[in-house]
Image (cartoon, rainbow, N blue to C red):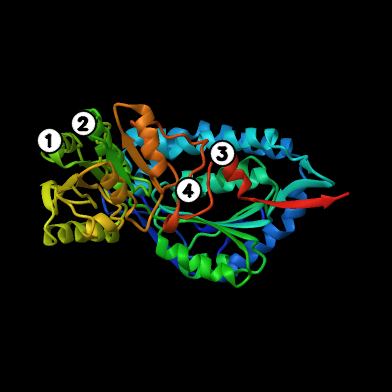
Amino acid sequence: MAEVHEYSDIYVGGAWVPSEGAGRIEVRNPATEEVIATVPDGTAGDVDRAVAAAKAALPGWSSCSPAERASWLRKAHEALNARAEEIAAVITQDMGMPVSLSGLVQVGLPTFNLAHFADLAESFNWDGEEVGNSLIVREPVGVVGCITPWNYPLHQIVLKVGAALAAGCTIVLKPTEVAPLSAYKLAEIFHETGLPAGVFNMVSGQGVPVGEAIARHADVDMVSFTGSTRAGTRVAELAAASVKRVALELGGKSANVILDDADLEKAVTDGVGKCYLNSGQTCSALTRMLVPAAKLEQAEQIAAAVAAGYSIGDPTSPSTVLGPLVNAAQLERVRGYIQTGIDEGAKLITGGLESGQEKGYFVAPTVFSGVTPDMTIAREEIFGPVLVIMPYTDEDDAVRIANDTEYGLAGGVWSGDADHALKVAKRLRTGQVEINGGAFNPAAPFGGYKKSGVGREGGTYGLEEFLETKAIQR
């Protein structure tokens, strides 16, 4: 029986305080299905208190110099770096990413971003530019509500909170109720570093009522949300009543276009990994692999062999590559999509409905082929380790298939000619494209076209999301 850690409070106005609500949310280890913690099931009243604290702290924080704001971010960076191993282990228990990757990705990315936003706070041109007789200045948007997901729970918080703090905004955070434990660790860090009271506030709880209370609150100047397109649409609807700014990072169904002159072995091998990272629970995962029809059978063989090497099991084991899905609901969802793929006539190459694990929310690494653009598994975001391979006739057909989606978050292009790959990449209607397996750049803007969202996160573009523009004529 796992020890259950009781997190009894929310964080408001620089202090740990009880929630108004008496409810508790159970947090389960997805590998063992055991309850490992409970957190408060917050209320709209809790949000009111947190927003009031953030509003009261805004004048003081926004008037701090960029260098002062940067110093607080660097303190948090140092504290997070010192606790990296501990927090990586917490995230592995909380949402299931194998520990071999959790430190590198789940903690490494937010650690980088805290330092990077500190650097940007100091290097950004706060003095403004001259346009004729006008001085154009940038100012913090105000109180920011941050609503974050479970798949990269700390990274997605820091992308929002780090940028907003660097911009001079104050924060009300609602972390995911599914995997909230790293948010508590970050709140502890901010508290221990002495961040001024009210600058950062956190209310744990469900989307209803906590998330919706943040989105509709008249004193919240902006909402930054990451999650499903369905939930993001609801956030935008609620925010519209008070005409607040909204940033949305939503779903994806990203295509990996392998051109005829690409190194097929290398491209398919890398593409399987880009689909399966975090057990496929990545909004920018390259889940649709597009290959020349003449090379379909060869691509299937390579993908099957690569998938067979993805060992699943205990995420605390260094040998595990593929951990569990985050919870029972996600397991049911992904299995449902696999069954739908079979029912609609897709060719199941490997994997399927059975994982071979006696407990835990595991799905075997799965590959479908012969998938047509009208099939459900080619159109809807599965959010599991399920790769679909789709044949195309020529380059124009590949681009057409890649763009035939309501999403536009990410993509990939593989070619023996980098200039040719760049031309194809520019034809894809998506927020980021990697060429020949180009590495993820956390300082580059991240966000999508179409139903994949509005706005950008990361780097200078992510900082600018939290700034207003003012023209001063003189």
Residue under pointer 4: 447
State how far apart marks 3 and 2 are (Cα): 33 Å
Residue type for callout 3: Gly
Residue under pointer 1: 298
Contact check, label 2 and label 1, Cβ < 8 Å: yes
For discs 1 and 3, the disc positioned in front in the rendered view = 1
Contact check, label 3 and label 2, Cβ < 8 Å: no
State how far apart marks 1 and 3 are (Cα): 40 Å
Label 2: how many residues lie within 10 Å, few (<14), some (14-19) or many (20+)?
many
| Front residue of 262 and 177 | 262
For discs 2 and 4, the disc positioned in front in the rendered view = 2
Residue type for callout 4: Gly
Q: Which mark is residue 264?
A: 2
Work out whether mark 4 precedes mark 1 in sequence or the reverse, and give the earlier one. 1
Work out whether mark 2 precedes mark 4 in sequence or the reverse, and give the earlier one. 2
State how far apart marks 4 and 3 are (Cα): 12 Å
Vertical placement of residue 387 versus 374, above or below: above
Q: Which mark is residue 33?
A: none
Vertical placement of residue 174 versus 64, above or below: below
On the image, which quarter does residue 72 sit in?
top right
Q: In terms of secondary structure, where does tag 4 sit?
A: loop
Vertical placement of residue 324 versus 40, above or below: above
Q: Is residue 21 visible?
A: no
Q: In terms of secondary structure, where does tag 2 sit?
A: helix
Residue type for callout 1: Gln
Residue under pointer 3: 459
